[in-house]
Image (spheres, rainbow, N blue to C red):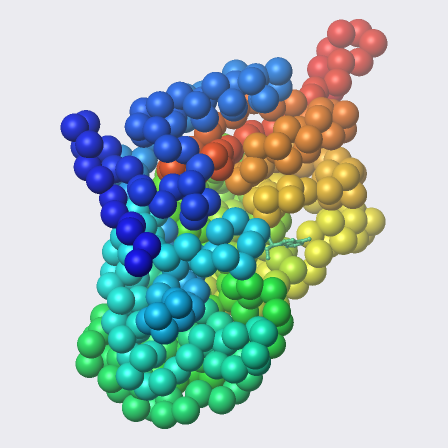
Amino acid sequence: MVKHTTINNSTGERRCSCFKRCGGCQLDMPYKQQLEWKQSKAQRMLSRFCKVEQIIPMQSPYNYRNKVQTVYRRDRSGRLISGVFQSSTRTLTATQDCFLEDTAAQSIVAELKKLFVSFRIMPYDERTGRGILRHTLIRTAKQTGQIMLVIVTKGAMFPSKHNFVKALLQKCPQVTTVVQNICDDPMPLTLGERNNVLYGSGKIADELCSCKFLISPASFYQVNPVQTQTLYDTAVKAADIAEGKRVLDAYCGVGTIGIVCAKQGAQVVGVESNKSAVRDAIANARLNKLNNIRFVNDDAAQFICESAYKGEKFDTIIMDPPRAGSTEQFISAVAAISPHSVVYVSCKIETLERDLKLFAKCGYKAQLIQPVDMFPHTTGIENVVLLKKKVKENTNGQQN
Ligand code: SAH
Protein backbone atom coordinates (compact mmCIF):
# COMPACT_ATOMS: atom_id res chain seq x y z
CA MET A 1 0.00 0.00 0.00
CA VAL A 2 1.32 3.44 -0.84
CA LYS A 3 1.85 5.43 2.31
CA HIS A 4 0.67 8.97 1.85
CA THR A 5 0.36 11.30 4.77
CA THR A 6 0.81 14.96 5.38
CA ILE A 7 2.92 15.92 8.34
CA ASN A 8 2.62 19.03 10.49
CA ASN A 9 6.08 20.21 11.40
CA SER A 10 6.87 22.58 14.27
CA THR A 11 6.07 25.73 12.27
CA GLY A 12 2.61 24.48 11.31
CA GLU A 13 3.75 23.96 7.72
CA ARG A 14 2.53 20.77 6.08
CA ARG A 15 4.74 18.46 4.07
CA CYS A 16 3.57 15.92 1.58
CA SER A 17 5.17 12.49 1.63
CA CYS A 18 4.46 11.79 -2.05
CA PHE A 19 6.02 15.09 -3.13
CA LYS A 20 8.60 13.62 -5.51
CA ARG A 21 6.33 10.91 -6.94
CA CYS A 22 3.21 12.92 -7.65
CA GLY A 23 4.50 16.10 -9.31
CA GLY A 24 1.42 18.15 -8.35
CA CYS A 25 3.58 20.35 -6.10
CA GLN A 26 7.08 21.40 -7.03
CA LEU A 27 8.16 23.51 -4.04
CA ASP A 28 8.84 21.40 -0.96
CA MET A 29 9.73 24.31 1.34
CA PRO A 30 7.98 26.53 3.94
CA TYR A 31 5.44 28.93 2.40
CA LYS A 32 7.46 32.04 3.25
CA GLN A 33 10.43 30.60 1.37
CA GLN A 34 8.18 29.74 -1.60
CA LEU A 35 7.11 33.38 -1.79
CA GLU A 36 10.73 34.53 -1.70
CA TRP A 37 11.57 32.04 -4.46
CA LYS A 38 8.71 33.37 -6.63
CA GLN A 39 9.54 37.01 -5.90
CA SER A 40 13.16 36.62 -6.91
CA LYS A 41 12.24 34.71 -10.09
CA ALA A 42 9.70 37.40 -11.03
CA GLN A 43 12.27 40.10 -10.41
CA ARG A 44 14.95 38.28 -12.38
CA MET A 45 12.66 37.79 -15.37
CA LEU A 46 10.55 40.92 -15.41
CA SER A 47 12.28 43.80 -13.62
CA ARG A 48 13.78 45.08 -16.88
CA PHE A 49 10.24 45.97 -18.00
CA CYS A 50 9.24 47.79 -14.76
CA LYS A 51 9.45 47.52 -10.96
CA VAL A 52 7.99 44.21 -9.73
CA GLU A 53 5.63 44.68 -6.75
CA GLN A 54 5.69 42.31 -3.76
CA ILE A 55 3.79 39.10 -4.49
CA ILE A 56 0.33 38.96 -2.86
CA PRO A 57 0.37 35.83 -0.66
CA MET A 58 -2.48 33.47 0.20
CA GLN A 59 -3.51 33.62 3.87
CA SER A 60 -4.11 29.90 4.23
CA PRO A 61 -2.26 28.24 1.35
CA TYR A 62 -3.79 24.74 1.57
CA ASN A 63 -6.64 22.82 -0.08
CA TYR A 64 -7.38 25.71 -2.41
CA ARG A 65 -8.02 23.75 -5.64
CA ASN A 66 -11.73 23.84 -6.52
CA LYS A 67 -11.16 21.45 -9.45
CA VAL A 68 -10.14 17.93 -8.49
CA GLN A 69 -9.43 15.34 -11.16
CA THR A 70 -8.94 11.77 -9.99
CA VAL A 71 -7.86 8.62 -11.80
CA TYR A 72 -8.58 5.08 -10.63
CA ARG A 73 -6.73 1.78 -10.99
CA ARG A 74 -6.72 -1.67 -9.48
CA ASP A 75 -3.53 -2.41 -7.57
CA ARG A 76 -1.77 -5.79 -7.69
CA SER A 77 -4.07 -7.22 -5.05
CA GLY A 78 -7.12 -6.08 -7.03
CA ARG A 79 -8.01 -3.21 -4.65
CA LEU A 80 -9.33 -0.01 -6.26
CA ILE A 81 -6.91 2.85 -5.69
CA SER A 82 -7.29 6.50 -6.67
CA GLY A 83 -4.86 9.31 -7.26
CA VAL A 84 -3.28 11.50 -9.88
CA PHE A 85 -1.11 10.86 -12.90
CA GLN A 86 2.54 11.77 -12.40
CA SER A 87 3.37 14.78 -14.58
CA SER A 88 3.11 13.91 -18.29
CA THR A 89 2.90 10.14 -17.65
CA ARG A 90 0.13 7.61 -17.18
CA THR A 91 1.59 6.30 -13.94
CA LEU A 92 -0.84 6.69 -11.09
CA THR A 93 0.38 8.02 -7.75
CA ALA A 94 -2.08 7.03 -5.04
CA THR A 95 -3.08 10.05 -2.97
CA GLN A 96 -5.36 10.33 0.04
CA ASP A 97 -4.94 13.70 1.64
CA CYS A 98 -3.38 15.93 -1.00
CA PHE A 99 -3.05 19.41 0.45
CA LEU A 100 -3.84 21.24 -2.77
CA GLU A 101 -7.25 19.64 -3.35
CA ASP A 102 -10.51 20.85 -1.83
CA THR A 103 -11.32 18.68 1.21
CA ALA A 104 -15.03 18.27 0.34
CA ALA A 105 -13.97 16.84 -3.04
CA GLN A 106 -11.54 14.49 -1.33
CA SER A 107 -14.26 13.02 0.87
CA ILE A 108 -16.49 12.50 -2.20
CA VAL A 109 -13.66 10.60 -3.91
CA ALA A 110 -13.36 8.34 -0.83
CA GLU A 111 -17.10 7.48 -1.10
CA LEU A 112 -16.92 7.10 -4.88
CA LYS A 113 -14.25 4.44 -4.54
CA LYS A 114 -16.51 2.31 -2.35
CA LEU A 115 -19.45 2.81 -4.70
CA PHE A 116 -17.47 1.98 -7.83
CA VAL A 117 -16.50 -1.30 -6.18
CA SER A 118 -20.01 -2.17 -5.04
CA PHE A 119 -21.55 -1.29 -8.45
CA ARG A 120 -18.70 -3.13 -10.23
CA ILE A 121 -17.69 -0.08 -12.22
CA MET A 122 -14.15 -0.84 -13.29
CA PRO A 123 -11.44 1.56 -14.41
CA TYR A 124 -10.93 1.50 -18.17
CA ASP A 125 -7.84 -0.50 -19.09
CA GLU A 126 -6.30 0.57 -22.40
CA ARG A 127 -4.46 -2.70 -22.88
CA THR A 128 -7.47 -5.00 -22.51
CA GLY A 129 -10.19 -2.51 -23.51
CA ARG A 130 -12.15 -3.56 -20.39
CA GLY A 131 -13.79 -1.30 -17.84
CA ILE A 132 -15.53 2.04 -18.40
CA LEU A 133 -14.24 4.53 -15.83
CA ARG A 134 -11.69 6.99 -17.23
CA HIS A 135 -11.55 9.55 -14.43
CA THR A 136 -13.73 11.80 -12.27
CA LEU A 137 -13.80 15.57 -12.10
CA ILE A 138 -15.22 17.39 -9.07
CA ARG A 139 -15.76 21.15 -9.14
CA THR A 140 -16.72 22.99 -5.99
CA ALA A 141 -18.12 26.52 -5.81
CA LYS A 142 -16.67 28.20 -2.74
CA GLN A 143 -19.29 30.91 -2.25
CA THR A 144 -22.46 28.91 -2.94
CA GLY A 145 -21.28 25.49 -1.73
CA GLN A 146 -22.54 23.84 -4.93
CA ILE A 147 -20.63 20.75 -6.10
CA MET A 148 -20.49 19.13 -9.55
CA LEU A 149 -19.38 15.54 -10.05
CA VAL A 150 -18.43 14.51 -13.58
CA ILE A 151 -17.89 10.80 -14.18
CA VAL A 152 -15.91 10.38 -17.39
CA THR A 153 -16.52 7.08 -19.15
CA LYS A 154 -15.16 5.26 -22.18
CA GLY A 155 -18.30 4.85 -24.30
CA ALA A 156 -21.87 5.61 -23.28
CA MET A 157 -22.45 2.46 -21.17
CA PHE A 158 -22.97 3.14 -17.46
CA PRO A 159 -24.81 0.16 -15.93
CA SER A 160 -27.29 0.95 -13.11
CA LYS A 161 -26.47 4.64 -13.39
CA HIS A 162 -29.68 5.81 -11.70
CA ASN A 163 -29.19 3.51 -8.72
CA PHE A 164 -25.58 4.57 -8.59
CA VAL A 165 -26.54 8.24 -8.40
CA LYS A 166 -29.19 7.47 -5.75
CA ALA A 167 -26.61 5.67 -3.60
CA LEU A 168 -24.09 8.46 -4.16
CA LEU A 169 -26.52 11.17 -3.05
CA GLN A 170 -27.31 9.24 0.10
CA LYS A 171 -23.61 9.22 1.00
CA CYS A 172 -22.78 12.67 -0.40
CA PRO A 173 -25.89 14.91 -0.21
CA GLN A 174 -23.65 17.94 -0.73
CA VAL A 175 -23.31 17.03 -4.46
CA THR A 176 -25.68 19.30 -6.41
CA THR A 177 -25.25 17.89 -9.91
CA VAL A 178 -23.92 14.68 -11.48
CA VAL A 179 -22.88 14.44 -15.13
CA GLN A 180 -21.66 11.47 -17.17
CA ASN A 181 -19.16 12.67 -19.75
CA ILE A 182 -18.47 10.30 -22.63
CA CYS A 183 -14.91 10.46 -23.82
CA ASP A 184 -13.21 8.28 -26.41
CA ASP A 185 -10.10 10.45 -26.62
CA PRO A 186 -7.13 8.45 -25.32
CA MET A 187 -5.43 11.59 -23.93
CA PRO A 188 -5.54 11.40 -20.12
CA LEU A 189 -7.89 13.74 -18.22
CA THR A 190 -9.67 15.10 -21.28
CA LEU A 191 -13.43 15.56 -21.53
CA GLY A 192 -15.50 14.39 -24.48
CA GLU A 193 -18.13 16.42 -26.31
CA ARG A 194 -21.11 14.44 -24.96
CA ASN A 195 -22.57 15.10 -21.50
CA ASN A 196 -25.38 13.08 -20.02
CA VAL A 197 -26.84 14.95 -17.02
CA LEU A 198 -27.78 12.33 -14.41
CA TYR A 199 -28.84 14.67 -11.61
CA GLY A 200 -29.36 18.42 -11.17
CA SER A 201 -28.78 21.07 -13.81
CA GLY A 202 -25.41 19.91 -15.16
CA LYS A 203 -23.83 23.19 -14.00
CA ILE A 204 -22.82 24.85 -10.76
CA ALA A 205 -23.13 28.51 -9.83
CA ASP A 206 -20.44 30.46 -7.99
CA GLU A 207 -19.92 34.09 -6.96
CA LEU A 208 -16.86 36.26 -7.39
CA CYS A 209 -16.43 40.04 -7.00
CA SER A 210 -20.22 40.36 -6.29
CA CYS A 211 -21.09 38.70 -9.63
CA LYS A 212 -22.66 35.29 -10.25
CA PHE A 213 -21.23 32.69 -12.59
CA LEU A 214 -22.53 29.43 -14.03
CA ILE A 215 -19.89 26.85 -14.84
CA SER A 216 -20.23 23.79 -17.14
CA PRO A 217 -17.99 20.70 -16.95
CA ALA A 218 -15.62 21.81 -19.75
CA SER A 219 -15.48 25.56 -19.16
CA PHE A 220 -12.34 27.14 -17.75
CA TYR A 221 -12.76 28.59 -14.28
CA GLN A 222 -9.89 29.77 -12.06
CA VAL A 223 -8.87 26.99 -9.65
CA ASN A 224 -8.05 29.10 -6.58
CA PRO A 225 -11.23 31.03 -5.69
CA VAL A 226 -9.75 32.96 -2.75
CA GLN A 227 -6.88 34.38 -4.77
CA THR A 228 -9.05 34.88 -7.87
CA GLN A 229 -10.95 37.59 -6.01
CA THR A 230 -7.62 39.39 -5.42
CA LEU A 231 -6.45 38.72 -8.98
CA TYR A 232 -9.60 40.15 -10.56
CA ASP A 233 -9.66 43.15 -8.18
CA THR A 234 -6.06 43.90 -9.20
CA ALA A 235 -6.79 43.50 -12.93
CA VAL A 236 -9.99 45.57 -12.86
CA LYS A 237 -8.30 48.32 -10.83
CA ALA A 238 -5.41 48.38 -13.34
CA ALA A 239 -7.96 48.67 -16.17
CA ASP A 240 -9.28 51.83 -14.46
CA ILE A 241 -12.90 51.08 -15.36
CA ALA A 242 -15.25 54.02 -15.81
CA GLU A 243 -18.85 54.37 -17.05
CA GLY A 244 -18.95 53.85 -20.84
CA LYS A 245 -15.31 52.83 -21.21
CA ARG A 246 -14.89 50.41 -24.16
CA VAL A 247 -13.22 47.25 -22.94
CA LEU A 248 -12.25 44.06 -24.74
CA ASP A 249 -11.93 40.96 -22.52
CA ALA A 250 -9.78 38.65 -24.65
CA TYR A 251 -9.54 34.93 -23.76
CA CYS A 252 -12.57 35.58 -21.56
CA GLY A 253 -13.54 32.02 -20.50
CA VAL A 254 -17.02 32.11 -18.94
CA GLY A 255 -16.91 35.90 -19.07
CA THR A 256 -15.72 36.53 -15.51
CA ILE A 257 -13.40 39.56 -15.82
CA GLY A 258 -15.53 41.23 -18.51
CA ILE A 259 -18.68 40.82 -16.43
CA VAL A 260 -17.01 42.43 -13.41
CA CYS A 261 -16.03 45.39 -15.67
CA ALA A 262 -19.55 45.58 -17.19
CA LYS A 263 -21.06 45.65 -13.70
CA GLN A 264 -18.95 48.78 -13.11
CA GLY A 265 -20.43 50.43 -16.21
CA ALA A 266 -17.95 49.59 -18.98
CA GLN A 267 -19.13 48.63 -22.50
CA VAL A 268 -17.56 45.21 -22.90
CA VAL A 269 -16.93 42.66 -25.65
CA GLY A 270 -15.60 39.24 -24.61
CA VAL A 271 -13.87 36.91 -27.06
CA GLU A 272 -13.26 33.23 -26.42
CA SER A 273 -12.52 30.18 -28.61
CA ASN A 274 -14.27 27.52 -26.47
CA LYS A 275 -17.92 27.19 -27.53
CA SER A 276 -19.18 25.86 -24.21
CA ALA A 277 -17.45 28.67 -22.29
CA VAL A 278 -19.08 31.25 -24.60
CA ARG A 279 -22.51 29.71 -23.98
CA ASP A 280 -21.84 29.99 -20.23
CA ALA A 281 -20.59 33.57 -20.66
CA ILE A 282 -23.83 34.60 -22.43
CA ALA A 283 -25.90 32.93 -19.68
CA ASN A 284 -23.71 34.66 -17.06
CA ALA A 285 -24.33 38.10 -18.56
CA ARG A 286 -28.08 37.39 -18.32
CA LEU A 287 -27.76 36.05 -14.79
CA ASN A 288 -26.11 39.31 -13.76
CA LYS A 289 -28.77 41.33 -15.65
CA LEU A 290 -26.21 43.06 -17.84
CA ASN A 291 -26.93 44.33 -21.34
CA ASN A 292 -23.67 46.25 -21.80
CA ILE A 293 -21.60 43.15 -22.58
CA ARG A 294 -21.57 40.75 -25.55
CA PHE A 295 -19.53 37.69 -26.36
CA VAL A 296 -17.96 36.42 -29.56
CA ASN A 297 -16.92 32.81 -30.17
CA ASP A 298 -13.70 33.28 -32.11
CA ASP A 299 -9.96 33.07 -32.00
CA ALA A 300 -8.87 36.19 -30.08
CA ALA A 301 -6.18 37.23 -32.60
CA GLN A 302 -8.54 36.72 -35.54
CA PHE A 303 -11.24 38.80 -33.85
CA ILE A 304 -8.88 41.68 -33.08
CA CYS A 305 -7.48 41.64 -36.63
CA GLU A 306 -11.02 41.94 -37.99
CA SER A 307 -11.90 44.66 -35.46
CA ALA A 308 -8.76 46.59 -36.45
CA TYR A 309 -9.71 46.24 -40.14
CA LYS A 310 -13.23 47.57 -39.44
CA GLY A 311 -11.76 50.50 -37.51
CA GLU A 312 -13.33 49.48 -34.18
CA LYS A 313 -11.84 51.05 -31.07
CA PHE A 314 -11.27 49.83 -27.52
CA ASP A 315 -9.96 52.02 -24.70
CA THR A 316 -8.57 49.04 -22.80
CA ILE A 317 -7.85 45.45 -23.74
CA ILE A 318 -7.74 42.94 -20.92
CA MET A 319 -6.10 39.67 -21.93
CA ASP A 320 -5.83 36.45 -19.96
CA PRO A 321 -4.37 33.82 -22.31
CA PRO A 322 -3.65 30.19 -21.40
CA ARG A 323 -0.16 29.09 -20.32
CA ALA A 324 1.12 29.15 -23.91
CA GLY A 325 0.67 32.93 -23.75
CA SER A 326 -0.47 35.12 -26.60
CA THR A 327 0.81 35.33 -30.18
CA GLU A 328 2.68 37.80 -32.31
CA GLN A 329 -0.44 38.09 -34.49
CA PHE A 330 -2.57 39.01 -31.44
CA ILE A 331 -0.08 41.57 -30.16
CA SER A 332 0.35 43.29 -33.55
CA ALA A 333 -3.44 43.40 -33.93
CA VAL A 334 -3.68 45.05 -30.49
CA ALA A 335 -1.10 47.60 -31.60
CA ALA A 336 -3.17 48.28 -34.75
CA ILE A 337 -6.27 48.95 -32.63
CA SER A 338 -4.09 51.10 -30.37
CA PRO A 339 -5.91 51.02 -27.00
CA HIS A 340 -4.65 53.41 -24.28
CA SER A 341 -3.89 50.48 -22.02
CA VAL A 342 -3.58 46.72 -21.98
CA VAL A 343 -4.00 44.66 -18.84
CA TYR A 344 -2.21 41.33 -19.24
CA VAL A 345 -3.19 38.61 -16.75
CA SER A 346 -0.64 35.83 -17.09
CA CYS A 347 -0.40 32.39 -15.50
CA LYS A 348 3.03 31.60 -16.91
CA ILE A 349 5.94 33.93 -16.41
CA GLU A 350 8.07 32.55 -19.28
CA THR A 351 5.43 33.31 -21.92
CA LEU A 352 4.66 36.64 -20.25
CA GLU A 353 8.31 37.68 -20.55
CA ARG A 354 8.31 36.71 -24.24
CA ASP A 355 5.08 38.65 -24.90
CA LEU A 356 6.22 41.76 -22.98
CA LYS A 357 9.18 41.97 -25.36
CA LEU A 358 6.75 41.94 -28.29
CA PHE A 359 4.59 44.60 -26.65
CA ALA A 360 7.68 46.76 -26.06
CA LYS A 361 8.48 46.54 -29.81
CA CYS A 362 4.91 47.70 -30.53
CA GLY A 363 5.30 50.74 -28.27
CA TYR A 364 3.62 49.50 -25.06
CA LYS A 365 5.47 49.99 -21.79
CA ALA A 366 4.77 48.15 -18.51
CA GLN A 367 3.64 50.50 -15.71
CA LEU A 368 2.73 47.89 -13.09
CA ILE A 369 3.77 44.30 -12.52
CA GLN A 370 1.85 42.67 -9.68
CA PRO A 371 2.49 38.99 -8.90
CA VAL A 372 -0.37 37.16 -7.14
CA ASP A 373 0.21 33.74 -5.58
CA MET A 374 -2.53 31.69 -7.24
CA PHE A 375 -0.76 28.32 -7.00
CA PRO A 376 0.96 27.80 -3.61
CA HIS A 377 3.41 24.84 -3.47
CA THR A 378 3.88 24.92 -7.24
CA THR A 379 6.35 26.90 -9.33
CA GLY A 380 3.50 28.75 -11.10
CA ILE A 381 3.62 32.54 -10.86
CA GLU A 382 0.57 34.57 -11.86
CA ASN A 383 1.06 38.25 -12.76
CA VAL A 384 -1.11 41.22 -13.59
CA VAL A 385 0.72 43.66 -15.87
CA LEU A 386 -0.55 47.09 -16.86
CA LEU A 387 0.88 48.29 -20.19
CA LYS A 388 0.41 51.77 -21.57
CA LYS A 389 1.01 53.14 -25.01
CA LYS A 390 4.20 55.17 -25.05
CA VAL A 391 3.39 58.79 -25.79
CA LYS A 392 5.30 59.97 -28.86
CA GLU A 393 6.95 63.37 -28.71
CA ASN A 394 6.62 65.58 -31.79
CA THR A 395 9.52 67.63 -33.14
CA ASN A 396 8.71 70.54 -30.75
CA GLY A 397 9.14 68.23 -27.79
CA GLN A 398 5.36 68.25 -27.16
CA GLN A 399 3.54 65.05 -26.37
CA ASN A 400 1.00 63.69 -28.83
N1 SAH B 1 -10.25 35.10 -18.21
C1 SAH B 1 -10.87 33.82 -17.93
C2 SAH B 1 -10.25 32.66 -18.69
C3 SAH B 1 -8.75 32.55 -18.70
S1 SAH B 1 -8.10 30.98 -19.26
C4 SAH B 1 -10.88 33.55 -16.46
O1 SAH B 1 -10.24 34.24 -15.66
O2 SAH B 1 -11.59 32.62 -16.04
C5 SAH B 1 -7.78 31.22 -20.91
C6 SAH B 1 -8.98 31.09 -21.82
O3 SAH B 1 -8.53 31.33 -23.14
C7 SAH B 1 -9.64 29.71 -21.85
O4 SAH B 1 -11.02 29.86 -21.59
C8 SAH B 1 -9.40 29.20 -23.28
O5 SAH B 1 -10.49 28.45 -23.79
C9 SAH B 1 -9.26 30.50 -24.04
N2 SAH B 1 -8.46 30.48 -25.28
C10 SAH B 1 -7.37 29.72 -25.55
N3 SAH B 1 -6.89 30.04 -26.77
C11 SAH B 1 -7.69 31.00 -27.28
C12 SAH B 1 -7.68 31.73 -28.50
N4 SAH B 1 -6.74 31.53 -29.43
N5 SAH B 1 -8.64 32.66 -28.69
C13 SAH B 1 -9.60 32.88 -27.76
N6 SAH B 1 -9.65 32.21 -26.59
C14 SAH B 1 -8.70 31.29 -26.34
* In the image: residue 363, left or right of residue 146: right
Residue 154, horizontal then vertical, whole percent: 54, 79
Question: Would residue 216 be visible to someone looking at this image?
Answer: no
Between 222 and 103, the one nearer to me in the picture: 103
Residue 278 sits in quarter = bottom right
Residue 323 against residue 58 in the figure, above or below: below
Residue 33, horizontal then vertical, whole percent: 35, 23
| Residue closest to the far left | 10
Between 34 and 20, the one nearer to me in the picture: 20
- For the N terminus, the image quarter is bottom left
| Residue closest to the far top | 396
Residue 31 sits in quarter = top left
At 83% from the left edge and 9% from the top edge, which residue is drawn? 395
Residue 3, horizontal then vertical, whole percent: 29, 51
- For the C terminus, the image quarter is top right
At 78% from the left edge and 43% from the top edge, which residue is drawn? 329
Residue 15 sits in quarter = top left
Residue 75 against residue 399 in the figure, above or below: below
At 43% from the left edge and 23% from the top edge, which residue is drawn? 37
Between 196 and 298, the one nearer to me in the picture: 196
Between 331 and 162, the one nearer to me in the picture: 162
Residue 47 against residue 328 in the figure, above or below: above
At 45% from the left edge and 26% from the top edge, which residue is drawn? 38
* In the image: residue 235, left or right of residue 185: left
Residue 395 against residue 111 in the figure, above or below: above
Question: Would residue 245 be visible to someone looking at this image?
Answer: yes
Q: How many marks?
A: 0
